[in-house]
Amino acid sequence: MAAPKRINLALQGGGAHGAFTWGVLDRLLDSDEIEIAGISGTSAGALNGAALKAGLATGGPAEAKALLAHMWARILGLRDLKIATWLSPFAPATAEISRVIEYSSAYAWGDFVSRSTSPYAMGPFYRNPLAPILADLPFERVCSSPGPDLYVCATNVRTGKIRIFTGDEISPDSLMASACLPTLFQAVEIDGEAYWDGGYTGNPALFPLYQDHLPNDIAIVNINPLVRDDLPYSAQEIQNRINEISFNASLFRDLRAIRFVQRLIESGKVEKGAMAYILVHMIADDDLMRDLSVATKLVPSAIIVERLFQAGRRAAERFLETHLADVGKRSTVDLAEMYD
């Protein structure tokens, strides 16, 4: 039997839409043809990456799948997700559920409060809602050396620079920092510095995966649509597209840098082997994500989470069927078309 192909994963943030990434990971864990060597994650991507590494470190794929499922059940406030699985076929279309949430008075009020009131106004009553969820993760396994390398991205509030946490730097605090939207949560302080969501500076950060001991292949699990053909008109549509553009900007920057190095190597200006020739892949379902909005990122719906999970599994299945043979040989994202 052939050895599994080594690949790095870059996991985007996007609130509850990170359930799509959970589905992708769940399917990849079923495959003995792929070995996950490195993980870079931001926000929900960092949480998924931490649960994945914790499971792989000691219990293998089955434990990783169980930890991911448990974490997402906790995010939804459920004991397990069986009820969502059962109800999903009978529920309205995903786009309809998204519109109900987006135009609900509860979401409108919450959005107004988040824009007009500081999270610091809660004073001593404030508690980060991720704290009890992350308390369930076995951090001695997240930080241990077995299993894939894990890199978690956050944004330094004071300097505006990216911060990468890895190894024993990864903790509940660093994961909360990576997922800290400043209009909703108080900044997370680590070693005297305050941090906000990593999506502002790296969503996800790709450069930690360029190291010599890691493979050249990076599969980006993308949960923010890169392209929307229709011009947004309503206030909600405009705000949603602003959110997507803002949180894709750092990814576009990193992809442009990868293409720049590729051109240098292809033209002979840089000797082969002097710099890594990164091979880029993408696992996504932009059609589904275009049916959703920023509202469904912030207001988890059990039905939408279940559908995102199943869509992620299907997207990973398509990637394995279509592009597994390309891993280690060629990019399946045409960066030349994007940037040349």
Image: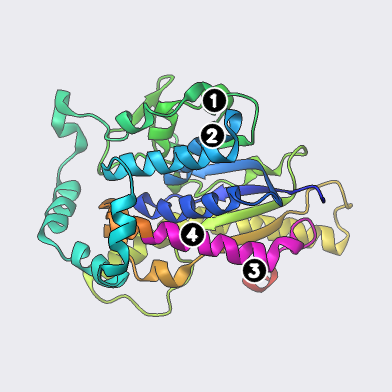
Q: Residues within 10 Å of mark 1 (few under 14, many from 20)?
A: many
Nearer to the camera, 51 or 17: 51
Picture quarter with the C terminus: bottom right
Q: Earlier in the sequence, mark 2 or mark 3?
A: 2
Q: Residues within 10 Å of mark 4 (few under 14, many from 20)?
A: many
**Up-down: is 223 above or below 153?**
below
Marks 3/1: CA–CA distance: 40 Å
Q: Is mark 2 in CB contact (under 8 Å) with mark 1?
A: yes
Q: Element under label 4?
A: helix
* Residue denoted by label 1: 141
Q: Residue at x 54, y 64 (%)?
A: 315
* Residue denoted by label 2: 55
Q: Earlier in the sequence, mark 3 or mark 1?
A: 1
Start-end of magenta stretch: 307-333
Q: Element under label 3?
A: helix
Marks 2/4: CA–CA distance: 19 Å
Q: Residues within 10 Å of mark 3 (few under 14, many from 20)?
A: few
- Per the picture, the main secondary structure of the magenta-coloured stretch is helix
**Up-down: is 284 above or below 112?**
below
In the figure, residue 317 lies in which quadrant? bottom right
Q: Residue at x 15, y 26 (%)?
A: 125
Task: Please name the amino acid that badge 2 sits on.
Answer: Gly
Task: Please name the amino acid that badge 4 sits on.
Answer: Gly
Residue 49 is at least partly visible in this image: no
Q: Residue at x 64, y 25 (%)?
A: 145
Task: Please name the amino acid that badge 3 sits on.
Answer: Tyr
* Residue denoted by label 3: 339
